Image: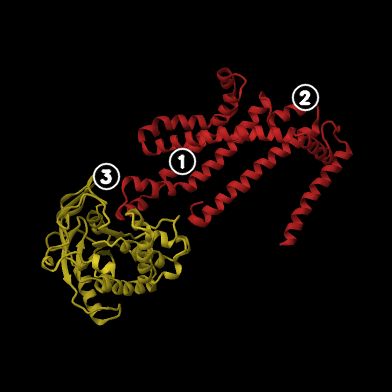
Chain colours: A red, B yellow
């Protein structure tokens, strides 16, 4: 579909041209509104100095640690709430409550507990994504059709086999959904946390840009944050969702 | 061949022993306001190699009775025995074909049919042989890599049947398996079922609300009446197979079953319409 590619490329070129024109018109001072060329230059400069890659690496490492732990915790909480009514009526309520708390509000507490450290930021990421993963896992298991369990039972499945071959695969679509949501919460929490206090990382770089009064740098870092977000969303989760659609049919995903 | 041998577990001297024996089965459902009697003292026996159909209007408890026989429903009064042992839960000796296509959506057709064999730890080579046989039996060899959402309703039910037969059950319980299908597919599957079970000699308990279907498939037709669910009468079907829906003998017997269904109980008037 070359014509489709062309039309989309035309759109982006148009965006850049309009942006450039607005910037050149100097409605706002160049210190407040940079040209796309300046943003591009800043991006290249920071990439060449290694600062950008270093920050990216720090951010992604924190994200990986926080996200991995919150996957385990969220799954555990979700399974607990799905299988025990008592847990659902007690812990489940806490999970729902904490899910509605913006994750950055954990930061003051994290700083008091862990100091200005890696642990503090990982803690914020953790709190940002754990509960949404837990809620998805819970609804995934709850939504398990009893019919499939009966079918497995009449084919001779033991309790353990039922769990491995029916419960776990049946909750995959809901889990991927929860993981996707958990990831975006984790990413947002991380950026907010890094912006506020931590050394190294994309959020920190954004703050450096502000301190230097370097609007081009601020724009370019924001661009990188968007690109990372879109890349993980599209590439990783996009593929997972396509795979689910193929396997589970359109109804499930 | 394996299927045929395993499906006839009863030695000839035991022929008269029923495979499935339900005696004095009662089932109560408790709703918030009241207690309803779904089954009232129902008794039923199915002998080896017999194809028994249960027919009745909705609410007569026929599916409940099948669930009790399957071991899915364990909350009832009475004595439910299979191969002379109390039914205490689900078991692969009594495979079930459900009304809804209860297939695992994350597995393709082959893996669905293979499911029960995998649970038993049967080695892959042997699994493949059995699955190939079952898929051929229900004419689905060409669709073994398809996922269930890619199949038509009739094909899904054939996969369910193949999956049930693959574990070499001693009896197959079928709960209105064709109820959601169009008339043409239904006719095809009724014919196919006669061929399959004619070949394997499997014992079947088949629940339906379609009188003609019961007459086409069954050696015996158990007629049930609703609220509370009771066995009204049992009609023998001594017709040659394959039976077709338009056979005169089938129509005649179906009419007889239908009149049994419509005959209001002599003992007590239930409805004043």
Q: Looking at the image, can residue B203 be seen?
A: no
Is the residue B110 above or below the residue A126 in the image? below
Element on which disc 3 rests: loop
Element on which disc 2 rests: helix
What count of labels does the image hold?
3
Q: CA distance from mark 1 to mark 2?
A: 42 Å
- Same subunit, tags 3 and 1: no
Residue neighbourhood size for the residue with mark 1, other residues' Cα within 10 Å, grouped as few (<14), some (14–19), many (≥20): many
Q: Which residue is mark 2?
A: A211
Q: Is residue B180 left or right of residue B269?
A: right
Residue B216 picture location, percent across and down:
26, 74
Residue A230 picture location, percent across and down:
66, 44
Q: Which residue is mark 1?
A: A137
Q: Residue at x 47, y 31 (%)?
A: A95
Q: Which residue is mark 3?
A: B31
Which numbered mark, 3 or 1, is in the foreground of this view? Answer: 1
Residue neighbourhood size for the residue with mark 3, other residues' Cα within 10 Å, grouped as few (<14), some (14–19), many (≥20): few
Q: CA distance from mark 2 to mark 3?
A: 69 Å
Of residues B227 and B214, the one drawn nearer to the viewer in this rendering: B214
């Amino acid at each position: 579909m070359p014509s489709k590619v062309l039309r989309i490329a035309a759109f982006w070129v148009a965006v850049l041209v309009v942006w450039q024109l607005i910037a050149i018109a100097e409605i706002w001072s160049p210190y407040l509104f940079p040209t796309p060329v300046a943003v591009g230059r800043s991006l290249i400069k920071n990439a060449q100095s290694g600062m950008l890659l270093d920050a990216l690496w720090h951010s992604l490492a924190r994200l990986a640690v926080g996200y991995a732990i919150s996957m385990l915790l969220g799954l555990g909480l979700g399974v607990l709430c799905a299988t025990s009514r008592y847990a659902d009526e007690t812990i489940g309520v806490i999970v729902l409550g904490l899910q509605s708390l913006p994750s950055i509000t954990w930061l003051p507490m994290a700083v008091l507990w862990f100091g200005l450290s890696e642990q503090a930021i990982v803690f914020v990421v953790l709190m940002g994504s754990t509960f949404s993963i837990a809620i998805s896992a819970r609804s995934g298991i709850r939504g398990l059709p009893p019919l499939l369990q009966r079918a497995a039972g009449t084919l001779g499945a033991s309790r353990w086999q039922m769990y491995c071959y029916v419960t776990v695969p049946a909750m995959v679509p809901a889990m991927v959904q929860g993981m996707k949501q958990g990831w975006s919460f984790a990413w947002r929490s991380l950026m907010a946390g890094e912006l506020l206090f931590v050394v190294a990382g994309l959020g920190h770089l954004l703050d450096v840009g502000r301190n230097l009064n370097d609007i081009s740098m601020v724009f370019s870092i924001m661009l990188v944050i968007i690109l990372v977000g879109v890349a993980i969303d599209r590439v990783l989760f996009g593929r997972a969702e396509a795979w689910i659609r193929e396997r589970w049919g359109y109804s499930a995903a | 061949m394996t299927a045929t041998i395993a499906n006839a577990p009863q030695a000839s001297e035991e022929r008269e022993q029923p495979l499935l024996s339900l005696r004095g089965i009662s089932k109560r459902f408790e709703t918030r306001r009241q207690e309803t009697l779904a089954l009232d003292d129902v008794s039923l026996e199915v002998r080896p190699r017999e194809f028994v159909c249960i027919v009745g209007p909705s609410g007569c408890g026929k599916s409940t009775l099948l669930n009790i026989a399957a071991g899915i429903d364990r909350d009832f009064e009475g004595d439910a025995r299979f191969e002379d042992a109390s039914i205490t839960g689900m078991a692969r000796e009594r495979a079930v074909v459900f009304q809804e296509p209860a297939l695992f959506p994350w597995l393709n057709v082959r893996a669905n049919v293979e499911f029960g064999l995998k649970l038993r730890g049967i080695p892959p080579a042997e699994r493949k042989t059995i699955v190939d046989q079952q898929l051929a039996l229900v004419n689905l060899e060409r669709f073994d890599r398809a996922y269930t959402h890619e199949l038509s309703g009739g094909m899904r039910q054939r996969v369910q049947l193949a999956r049930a037969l693959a574990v070499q059950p001693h009896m197959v319980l079928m709960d209105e398996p064709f109820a959601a299908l169009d008339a043409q597919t239904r006719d095809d599957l009724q014919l196919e079922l006669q061929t399959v079970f004619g070949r394997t000699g499997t014992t079947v308990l088949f629940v339906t609300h379609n009188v003609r279907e019961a007459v086409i498939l069954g050696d015996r037709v158990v007629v049930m009446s609703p609220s509370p669910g009771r066995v009204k009468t049992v009609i023998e079907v001594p017709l040659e197979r394959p039976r077709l829906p338009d056979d005169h003998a089938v129509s005649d017997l179906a009419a007889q079953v239908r009149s049994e269904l419509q005959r209001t109980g002599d003992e007590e008037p239930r409805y004043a319409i």
